[in-house]
Image (cartoon, rainbow, N blue to C red):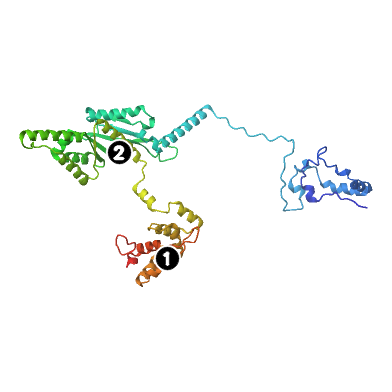
């Protein structure tokens, strides 16, 4: 007689059985377990004693929904290291209610909206100061009242006023204000700067600072008189007293035409009187003075304009150039970008494929400063000698023992690092390394001990 034991073990009895689609009545395509012929024959042939034993053994298995409510210790009382059974959600059971979000008051909403608008305004303000397209909007041209009394000043003011009717990013603001240069007619500039608030969330302030440039405007006759009087010594003294940190620029309107008229008048007077007019100034004297100022005062700029319209155009272009200078890179940054290879993608890609320590990277960057030394060459040299000091020691010993050509040949035959195909260092880079690190010229010598 064959009996099928359907009793569950203690672990299976305590494990909740999730009803599957096949176990649910009326669902699935598999027939019930009791409809199997073999199982029906086993059930019919089993004795009542076996049924009683089977019911007693199956008593430990409880219903799935009731088992979820029992603690884990009730099923595994004899197992001290039993795990806690995870309670699975029962199908059809409603989900627990969610915690309701606290409703904000009208004052809180208004405060949050005001804070949001303030942050947006701060971002727009910072973006306007960092945008080169809007650089002219933060510039202001200061026109001296004495300049506005002349035709030259009126032409400059009309040109600046004309920019107000064009695109907003091309408009240039100007005001009439005394710039404090005594009797001279001058033009100065101010720029609006965004101050750092110092702490996060604080409101940034905008302050107006003077630009270190000053433009002295002359009519041609006034310039010639100043040259005849003291050779512009009074102007240079006034500039050094009132604006010593500013770079002076001279703008003379109609100088060539005025000097031509003077030459014609002098020629007529010479032909009538038979001699040169006393105290007359010549074109050669003016040009000699201007070239002398360019040598003695290299920071002094000079510009000659044909008429008032050309002078006004020069003032506008000068304003644009001053505004653009705030976005220009410094000389040191330009030099390092032109000479330093560590900022390039070649160095970054090489170090990514062939990583080195921090000290080795510093030595590689130092060697890259030498002409004809690429990052792949510097990486190979540092990998061979370890550091720059050991390289210079080896070079000094080779220089002292007359084995420098052999040392240079050894560097030439070294293989570069990170190249697509095997490539040697080459004679040009090897000569650059040995010459710059062991030369005796004071202006090129790197280390005095290595050169001796």
Q: In the drawing, does residue 44 fall left or right of residue 287?
A: right
Please, what secondary structure does the residue beneath circle 2 have? strand
Q: Residue furthest left?
A: 273
Please, what secondary structure does the residue beneath circle 1 have? helix
Q: Residue at x 31, y 65 (%)?
A: 440
Residue 55 visible in the picture: yes
> Callout 2 environment at 10 Å: few (<14), some (14 to 19), or many (20+)?
some
- Image quadrant of residue 152? top left
Q: Position of residue 323 (x, y in %)?
A: 34, 37
Q: Check disc 2 and report the residue beneath it.
A: 211
Question: How far is mark 2 from mark 1, CA to CA?
Answer: 53 Å
Q: Residue furthest bottom?
A: 401
- Image quadrant of residue 243? top left
Name the front one of labels 2 and 1: 1
Q: Position of residue 186 (x, y in %)?
A: 24, 34
| Rendered position, 22 above or below 254 | below
Q: Check disc 1 and report the residue beneath it.
A: 411
> Callout 1 environment at 10 Å: few (<14), some (14 to 19), or many (20+)?
many
Q: Position of residue 70 (x, y in %)?
A: 75, 44
Q: Quadrant of the C terminus?
A: bottom left
Label 2 or label 1, whichever comes before in sequence order: 2
Q: Nearer the viewer, residue 387 or 7?
A: 387
Q: Residue furthest front?
A: 271
Q: Nearer the viewer, residue 152 or 128?
A: 152
Residue 182 visible in the picture: no
Q: Nearer the viewer, residue 275 or 24?
A: 275
Q: Residue at x 48, y 32 (%)?
A: 116
Q: Position of residue 50 (x, y in %)?
A: 91, 49
């Amino acid at each position: 007689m064959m009996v099928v034991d359907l009793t569950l073990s203690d672990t299976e009895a305590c494990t909740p059985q999730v009803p599957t689609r096949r176990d649910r009545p009326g669902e699935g395509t598999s027939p019930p377990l009791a409809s199997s012929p073999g199982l029906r024959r086993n059930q019919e042939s089993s004795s009542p004693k076996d049924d009683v034993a089977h019911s007693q053994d199956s008593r430990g298995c409880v219903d799935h929904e009731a088992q979820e409510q029992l603690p884990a210790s009730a099923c595994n009382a004899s197992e001290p290291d039993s795990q806690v059974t995870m309670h699975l959600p029962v199908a059809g059971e409603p989900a627990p209610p969610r915690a309701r979000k606290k409703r904000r008051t009208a004052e809180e909403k208004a405060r949050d909206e005001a804070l949001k608008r303030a942050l947006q305004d701060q971002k727009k303000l910072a973006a306007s100061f960092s945008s080169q397209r809007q650089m002219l909007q933060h510039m202001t041209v200061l026109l001296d009242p004495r300049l506005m009394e002349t035709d030259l000043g009126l032409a400059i003011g009309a040109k600046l006023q004309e920019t107000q009717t064009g695109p907003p990013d091309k408009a240039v603001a100007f005001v009439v204000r005394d710039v404090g240069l005594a009797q001279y007619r001058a033009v100065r500039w101010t720029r609006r700067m965004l101050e750092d608030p110092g702490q996060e969330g604080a409101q940034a302030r905008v302050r107006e600072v003077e630009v270190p440039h000053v433009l002295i405007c002359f009519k041609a006759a006034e310039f010639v008189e100043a040259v005849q009087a003291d050779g512009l010594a009074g102007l240079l003294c006034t500039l050094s007293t009132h604006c010593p940190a500013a770079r002076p620029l001279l703008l003379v309107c109609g100088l060539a035409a005025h000097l031509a008229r003077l030459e014609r008048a002098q020629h007529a007077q010479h032909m009538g009187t038979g001699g040169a007019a006393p105290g007359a100034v010549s074109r050669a004297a003016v040009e000699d003075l201007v070239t002398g100022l360019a040598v003695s005062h290299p920071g002094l700029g000079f510009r000659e304009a044909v008429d008032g319209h050309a002078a006004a155009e020069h003032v506008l272009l000068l304003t644009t150039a001053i505004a653009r200078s705030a976005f220009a890179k410094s000389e040191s940054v330009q030099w390092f970008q032109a000479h330093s290879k560590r900022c390039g993608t070649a160095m970054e890609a090489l170090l990514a494929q062939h990583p080195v320590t921090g000290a080795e990277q510093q030595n590689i960057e130092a060697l890259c400063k030498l002409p004809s030394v690429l990052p792949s060459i510097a990486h190979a040299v540092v990998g061979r000698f370890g550091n720059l000091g050991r390289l210079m020691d080896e070079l000094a010993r080779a220089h002292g023992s007359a084995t420098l050509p052999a040392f240079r040949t050894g560097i030439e035959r070294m293989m570069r690092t990170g190249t697509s195909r095997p490539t040697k260092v080459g004679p040009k880079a090897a000569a650059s390394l040995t010459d710059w690190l062991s030369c005796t010229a004071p202006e090129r010598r790197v280390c005095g001990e290595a050169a001796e």
